[in-house]
Image (cartoon, rainbow, N blue to C red):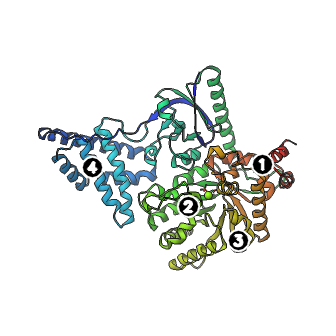
Amino acid sequence: MHMKLYGIGASQGIAVGPVKIVRELPPVERESVAEGQIPVQKERVAQAFDRARRELEQLERRIRPELKEMIAAQMMILDDPELAEEIEANLAEGKQAEWAVEDAVRSIAGAIADLEDPYLKERAADVHDLGKRILAALMNRSAPGIHVTEPVILAAKDLTPSDTAGLDPSLVLGFATELGGPTSHSAIMARTIGIPALVGVKDLLSSLRDGDTAAIDAEAGELLVNPAGEVRLSYENKAAERRRMIQEQRKSKDLPAVTADGRRVELAANIGSVKDAAAALEWGAEGVGLFRTEFLYMEKHALPDENEQFRAYEQVVRQLAPRPVIFRTLDIGGDKGLPYLQLPPEENPFLGYRALRFCLDRPELFKTQLRAMLRASTGGKARIMFPMVATVGEWRRAKAYLEEAAAELGFAELPEAGIMIEIPAAAVMARAFADEADFFSIGSNDLIQYTMAADRGNKAVSYLYRHLEPAVLRLIAGVIEAAHEAGKWVGMCGEMAGDPEAIPLLLGLGLDEFSMSAASLPKAREIIRSLSYEECRRLAESALKCRSIEEVRQLYRL
Ligand code: PEP
Ligand code: MG
């Protein structure tokens, strides 16, 4: 019998294949050496530096263009006399090579992280990354980053951006990690390239060995270890069927999202980085309905400065032009931390000091981001929206900062400014907001968790967290109605927008824009094109009268 492990599906799909375990380096042993051994340690360090240099040169040739800057920075650090001197001093104290390198890396990275200049501050991450590479060479381990030459399922404690930097996505069938949530970097990467992924899988690494076969079913949240016979065959068939279906759906990526009876809606993608923009276009996005800018902050060790943000935002706007891009201002807090801000821990972070609440208290940080977005907006069509708005007062303050930032830049015209409706209070007050905002985007992920008082990541209460709950549908209906009364359009950028079961209802309720993970777009397009808007309207009308989710589901069976 095969063993079954459980996790949270972070990117849908099914995959079967050989396991490749991504190992972390073992901890460095703090050993001293006798004086006579010091030259040997020096030689070991020199050789490790040589290997690191060769690896970086090789990586440079095959890496994605946006990561070249990272390689260049690491090359510079490798040649930095300060690093060499610090290691030398540690070696002279009798520290073994690994210890000497680790200490030097820590001290240099620490000093950089304390600097004022945000650009330099961010180099601390590069120092750490390079340190890992040198240590791997010293320990005779394979270089950091994942090396695969045949299709595999990756299993790791966690996957960081630099782990996956040189990775050929076409060779990754799927992955599973012990840590990380559905919004972790790796989960988003999985959704962007459309491979199945499970996160939060307990006992993953102790249950698997390289070369085992794993079958991932992300929807069921399951990973089977060494399935055999019929079970394995059925997974292989399902995986092959899914690949065929995606190929087929991708062929229609340029067809408009229009119902059989002529209601046209917009299909947009959610992205979290510059490189996701290309994937969005590949999957047929008509725009970006949500750019989660916090990932730009989360992959750093210090706040990104205005120019750095501008460069990222501008690239996305230009790539998408003339299609629209909706930038969401920094949405940290809840499950998305920024350790370098050292915010005090909270008892209840999802109800705490997060997103706009935090930004309104930090005008400099907030306006830096707004200026970067405004500057980028001239390269194409950009819109700006604010997350976690609870009151009209908050919205007005946010808008005032946007106006201030525009004035500082001498911009006479503002891009469209909208509100994410993801707090029930905002949904209830939608009519008041609709008079002032240019558009709404419903953040169903949060709206549902706050409406149902059920943590969106907590399995024990997942029976409450469901897209078709009548309470949720009624709130959404009210938001769309309020916006339309004021002549404004409404999108949705939570996962619900890409849920095949929810799409007919959302269409029927009058949603104008559906924004989702890029890989969900083909299916959504197919569904919308197969539906009749008139029938969806009737369905929605009936659903609003339902008293339970069971009654809503029953409507689908009629
Ligand atoms: C949402 O809450 O629906 C949303 C899109 O924002 P996030 O998932 O980033 O909280
Ligand atoms: Mg949200």
The 10 Å Cα crowd at callout 2, few under 14, some 14 to 19, many 20 or more, is many
Mark 3 vs mark 1: in front: 3
Residue 103's label in the rendered image is 4
What amino acid type should be assigned to the residue bearing mark 2? Answer: Asp
Horizontal and vertical percent position of residue 18: 52, 28
**Mark with earlier residue (1, 2):** 2
Of all residues, the one furthest to the left in this rendering is: 36
Q: Secondary structure at mark 2?
A: loop
Residue holding disc 1: 529
Specify which label sits upstream in the sequence, 2 or 3.
2
Closer to the observer: label 4 or label 1? 4
In the displayed structure, does residue 351 sit left or right of residue 160? right
Residue 311 seen anywhere in this rendered image of the structure: yes
Real-space Cα distance between discs 2 and 4?
A: 34 Å
Of the residues shown, which amino acid type is indicated by label 1? Arg
According to the picture, the residue beneath numbered tag 2 turns out to be 331
Is disc 2 in contact with disc 4, using a CB cutoff of under 8 Å? no
Marks 3/1 in contact by CB < 8 Å: the verdict is no
Question: Which residue is denoted by mark 3 in the rendering?
Answer: 433
Q: Residue at x 45, y 66 (%)?
A: 307
Mark 2: C-beta under 8 Å from nearest atom of ligand 1 = yes
Residue 370: x %, y % from top left: 53, 70
Q: Secondary structure at mark 4?
A: helix
Q: Nearer the viewer, residue 546 or 25?
A: 546
Q: Is residue 185 left or right of residue 544?
A: left
Secondary element under disc 1, as helix, strand or loop, is helix
